[in-house]
Image (cartoon, grey):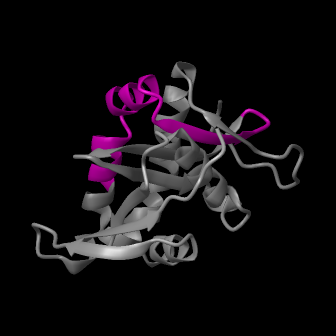
């Protein structure tokens, strides 16, 4: 997969959503560098945005999550259009990443990535959690549309309210394998 160069202006292939493979790790890391940093910098500041990319979009972290089967990607024409990653917080299953390329937002890829992560959950899981920065109004609106309600807000150690972490959850209904 590639994320280099401009996105095609016309739609040539419908995006597919699939489990990430080890050979996707470099493209996923590049995606984080090109999409996450500019999206977050106006919301949480340059330093915090850089820390997000450095700490969470590096080959070691992404590679481990891919190896554990926790990452799904959306792609079309060999180009990475979106990334989603789940994990655990104690017994809770949590969506830790859900990002769509800036030129492909609003086209239904976010719900498709979320559905792919949900299908991966063990059958006995009855609730899915997500977390996002308090300053991320776009994520808040998306998760509300997807049925997630606020459980709690974890204040930032920095005292910056925008860096607080909003924890949301939604019940998981019956799923097809």
Q: Is residue 13 above or below residue 114?
A: above
Is 18 in front, or is 46?
18
x, y percent for residue 5: 68, 42
x, y percent for residue 92: 30, 51
Q: Is residue 47 above or below residue 20?
A: below
Q: Residue at x 26, y 51 (%)?
A: 51
Question: Which part of the image, by quadrant, shows the C terminus?
Answer: top right
124 vs 18, left or right, is left
Is 68 in front, or is 58?
68
152 vs 95, left or right, is left
Is 68 included in the stretch rendered in magenta? Answer: yes
80 vs 170, left or right, is right
Q: Is residue 103 above or below residue 15?
A: below
Location of residue 72 by image quarter: top right
Is 128 in front, or is 50?
128
x, y percent for residue 126: 43, 55
Q: Residue at x 52, y 72 (%)?
A: 147
Q: Which residues are magenta?
A: 50-78
Q: Residue at x 33, y 58 (%)?
A: 49
Location of residue 48 by image quarter: bottom left
x, y percent for residue 120: 53, 39
Residue 157 visible (yes or no): yes
Q: How many marks?
A: 0
Is 82 included in the stretch rendered in magenta? Answer: no
Q: Is residue 64 above or below residue 72?
A: above
């Amino acid at each position: 997969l590639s994320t280099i160069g401009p996105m095609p202006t016309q739609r040539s292939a419908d995006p597919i959503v699939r489990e990430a493979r080890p050979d996707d790790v470099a493209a996923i890391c590049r995606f984080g560098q090109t999409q996450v940093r500019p999206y977050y910098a106006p919301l949480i500041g340059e330093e915090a945005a850089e820390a997000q990319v450095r700490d969470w979009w590096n080959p070691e972290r992404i590679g481990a999550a891919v190896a554990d089967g926790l990452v799904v990607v959306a792609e079309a024409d060999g180009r990475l259009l979106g990334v989603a990653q789940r994990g655990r917080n104690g017994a809770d299953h949590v969506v830790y990443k859900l990002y769509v390329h800036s030129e492909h937002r609003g086209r239904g890829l976010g719900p498709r990535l979320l559905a792919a992560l949900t299908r991966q959950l063990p059958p006995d899981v009855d609730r899915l959690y997500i977390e996002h920065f308090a300053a991320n109004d776009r994520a808040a609106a998306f998760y509300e549309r997807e049925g997630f309600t606020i459980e709690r807000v974890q204040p930032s150690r920095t005292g910056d309210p925008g860096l607080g972490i909003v924890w949301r959850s939604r019940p998981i209904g019956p799923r097809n394998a």
